[in-house]
Structure formats: structure tokens, C-alpha cells
Amino acid sequence: MGYRRINTVEELLQNRNRQKIYDAIRRYPGMSFTDLRVMLDIKNGTLSHHLIKLEKEGLVRSKKIGIFRRFYPAGSAMPKDMEEKIIEVILDDPGISQTAVAKRLSITRQVANYHINSLRRRGKLVVRRSGRSSEIYLR
């Protein structure tokens, strides 16, 4: 039997579990799979099945942020990932130090260092040493 496209939102949400999942995502955008599973007390396979259906039908979107996939109602603003935020900070202040990036984004220096090094290795940033500090520029 294959995948059958559901014609209406009402038809899609007739399933009680799917309705609970969709309501939770609308109420708490950005929940992870584990957050949803624990909050709704739904088994892994059941939750996975319904999330796939909700995504295929366009009611829910997901984005991998760090090690977690986060779920959002369709049409809602998706948060920027940390690397996008770091690039924006550097655009606003070319030559900014890693410490200043961390302070501006309210993250630890270690987190800033991890993402800055990742961006540098992929050729998106240039890091110039200046004494004990560094200056960061977009490539």
C-alpha cells in the first residue's frame, strides 16, 4: 500500500496522537524529538511516524541545531544556528576578537572557539593573530 496523501488538515489531525504532537509543537516551538517523546509519553516509532506525516503534509518543519533536530510549526520563524549568528556579528564588526564574539552572543569562549574554528576550516573566516588575541574576518 504506499503513502496516501491526506487532503485536509482536519483529516490529518483526526488522529489523536498526531493532534497532540502538533499542538505541542505549536505551543512550544523548538522542541526536540526527545522533548516531545517525554512530554507526550509516546513511543519512538509512533512519534517518528507522525512527525514524518506532519512534515510531509507541510504542517511542521524541522531544523537540526547542534546535535538535536528541533520541530516548528510551518510558517514560524526558524532560529538561526550559531554559525549564522557568528557570521552576522563579524559582518557588523570586522576584526572582532573571539572573546568579544562570545560576549556579544552570550556564549562561552569554548563554544565560540569551536564554531569559529569550524568556519575557518571550511574557508568562511580568516583568523589573524594579534599578540595574545585574534582578529576575525569574513573571507
Image: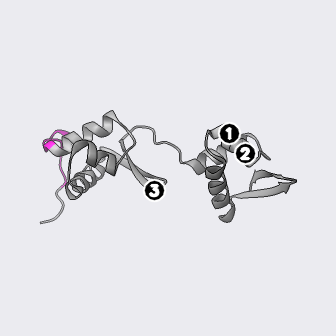
The circle drawn on residue 99 is 2
Viewer-proximal residue among 65 and 52: 65
Three-letter amino acid code at the position of disc 3: Ile
The circle drawn on residue 90 is none
Q: Image check: 120 left or right of 12?
A: right
Residue labelled with disc 3: 67
Residue 30, given in percent of the width and then of the height, sits at 40, 42
Residue with the most extreme top position: 27
Is label 2 in a helix, a strand or a loop?
A: helix
In the image, the segment drawn in magenta is 5-16
**Residue 127 visible in the snapshot:** yes
Q: Image check: 69 left or right of 51?
A: right
- The residues tagged by marks 3 and 1 sit, at their Cα atoms, a distance apart of 23 Å
Residue labelled with disc 1: 103
Three-letter amino acid code at the position of disc 2: Thr
Q: Does the stretch in magenta take in 12? A: yes
- The residues tagged by marks 2 and 3 sit, at their Cα atoms, a distance apart of 24 Å
- How many C-alpha atoms fall within 10 Å of the one at disc 3: few (<14), some, or many (≥20)? few
Residue 16, given in percent of the width and then of the height, sits at 14, 42
